[in-house]
Structures are given as C-alpha cells and as structure tokens.
Image (cartoon, grey):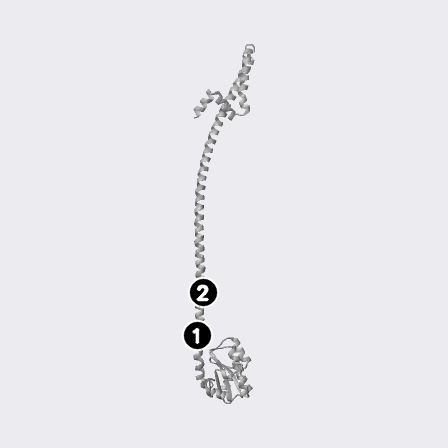
Amino acid sequence: MREQILELLRTDPEFREEVRRLVLTDELLALPSKFDQLVAVVRELAEIQRQQGEQIRSLMEAQKRTEEQVRVLAEAQRRTEEQLQRQAEQIQALTEAQRRTEEQLQRQAEQVRALTETQRRTEERLQALTQQVSALVAAHARMEEAFQWLIDWQRGEMERREGERYEPHVIRRAPILFNGGEGGSPYEPMIQQRLASMLSREQREQLFHEEGDPFLAELIWWKDGQVAVVEISLQVDGYDVIRASRRAQTLRNASIQAIGVVIGRDWANPDAYDAAIRYRVEWLIGSEMSEGLRRFREA
C-alpha cells in the first residue's frame, strides 16, 4: 500500500496535487508555483551567468537550499501520512471497542429486563404469600380468641363448680368454724321459720332489696344471743362484704344483735379487705380471722 501511494505520488500529478491540498498548508501548496518562478529566475540567471559567474554560484547555492527544503517537506509529508495511518488504526480500534460495548450494553439490558420480570413475579408471589399469612394470622387470632374464651369458660365453670362445692362444705363445717352454736342455710325451712320469727310482718314486707335480705344469705348462725349473717365465696370481693353488712343491718334494725361475716379462701382484691374494715364486717379468709369473729367463736 505504501509503495503504491509513493508510486502515485511520483507518477500521478493530479493525485500528488490532491494529497498536497489535503496534507500541506496553503503556504506549502504555493511552493511549486514559487519553485517554478524560481526555475524561471534560475534560467534568467543562467543567461546572466555567462556574464556574472559569481552571481550564478550564489543562485546555485540558493537552489541547493531550496531543494533541501523540498526534501524536508517530503519527509514531513511522510511523517504526516504515518500519523494519519496510526490515527486511522486507532479510529478502527475505537470503533470495534464501541461495537463490543454496545453489544455488552444490549446483553445487560436484556438481563435487566429478565431481572425486572423475575422481580415482578417475585413481588406477585410475595403479595400472595402476604395475603395468605394475613389470613392465617387472622385465623390464628380467631382461634386464640376462641381458645381463650374456652379457657375462660372452663375456668369460670370450674370456679363455679368449686364454689358450689365450697359453700355446702363451709355450711357443714359451721359448728367447727364458729366453735359451737346452731344455724344453717336459709333454704332450710327451720332456718326460714326462725329467721322470720325475728322480723315483724312489716319488716319482712320491706325486704324488696336483695342485698339487704337476710333470707338470701348463704348461712345464718346463732350463738350466745348473737346472729352471724354469712356470705360465702371462694374469692371474697367488695359485693360480698356489702351484702353481709346490709343483711346484718336488716336484723340490727329489728333490735337483733347481728354481725356480718364473709368466709372464703382468698380476698378477690385489696379493695375487698378495705371494704370489710369500712363496713365493719368480720371475716374468715383462708386461715386468717378477724378479731370480731374470734370473739364470736369464743363466746
């Protein structure tokens, strides 16, 4: 390729002229015309040389310098062509690198689309799983509520049954608990008759409020001229204390020496104990006994 270009430069004036226009500056392109002018001058000097030898030698030296300049220009042209060749190779390499980069970007774009589709399907499955988990959580919550209700019902039922067993147990042990005396449940006709004989007809007719009705007490017990109006519960609360107080007060209103008493295994809460102190109700809670009940036992 190089030899062909050089051959064209030597043999084809038009090609050489076109390369010069592409490579050389306006000043360099003007050199040939200047060179022609110089040749004309040389020819004129050659005629004059016959007459002025010294001037001809000077012109020949000038011509030599001009030829050297032409050689330098040719060398510069060669270096320029080599630079253009290297630049062309670099451009080709960059073009190839750009092509590979575009192919790589295309593959990455396809991977991104695939990942996006995978993520979309994953999000759909995750949403479905979330809905399933929410449904399971709700179902589990309902099951826990039902199970808790069942536990509470069972506990309440057990407490109710235990309470039903506890009350007759206390009534049967009343002679021991009170250390003598006599009495029983107001359900017994004999207890009802004795209790009714203690109240006038007018007083009995005024017993509209259940909390003040001694006939609704769990236990009535007589000892040494006193009457204990007893409320029985596994866990004694404030309502038990108030009922015992009001039912004993009903008898005291009939001029009967009566005390209110609560019996149970535990206090339901601290307020129940405070209520017993406030309403002056005696108690037997577990193994603890109030001082007033102790005196009643010792009577």
- Residue located at (54% from left, 19% from top): 33
Q: Is residue 123 above or below residue 194?
A: above
Determine if residue 95 is in view.
yes
Question: How far from the left and from the top, in percent, is residue 23?
Answer: 51, 26
Q: Please indicate whether residue 171 sits to the left or right of residue 253 in the image.
A: left
Determine if residue 182 is in view.
no
- Residue located at (47% from left, 33% from top): 91
Q: The residue under label 2 is which amino acid type?
A: Arg
Q: Is residue 246 above or below residue 147?
A: below
Q: Residues within 10 Å of mark 2 (few under 14, many from 20)?
A: few
Mark drawn on residue 157: 1
Discs 2, 1 touching: Cβ within 8 Å: no
Q: Identify the residue position indicated by label 2 in the image.
A: 142
For the N terminus, the image quarter is: top left
Question: How far from the left and from the top, in percent, is residue 272?
Answer: 52, 77
Q: Residues within 10 Å of mark 1 (few under 14, many from 20)?
A: few
Q: Secondary structure at mark 1?
A: helix
- Residue located at (55% from left, 24% from top): 26
Q: Is residue 265 above or below residue 38?
A: below
Q: The residue under label 1 is which amino acid type?
A: Glu
Measured Cα–Cα span from mark 2 to mark 1: 22 Å
- Residue located at (54% from left, 78% from top): 275
Q: Earlier in the sequence, mark 2 or mark 1?
A: 2
Q: Residue furthest top?
A: 51
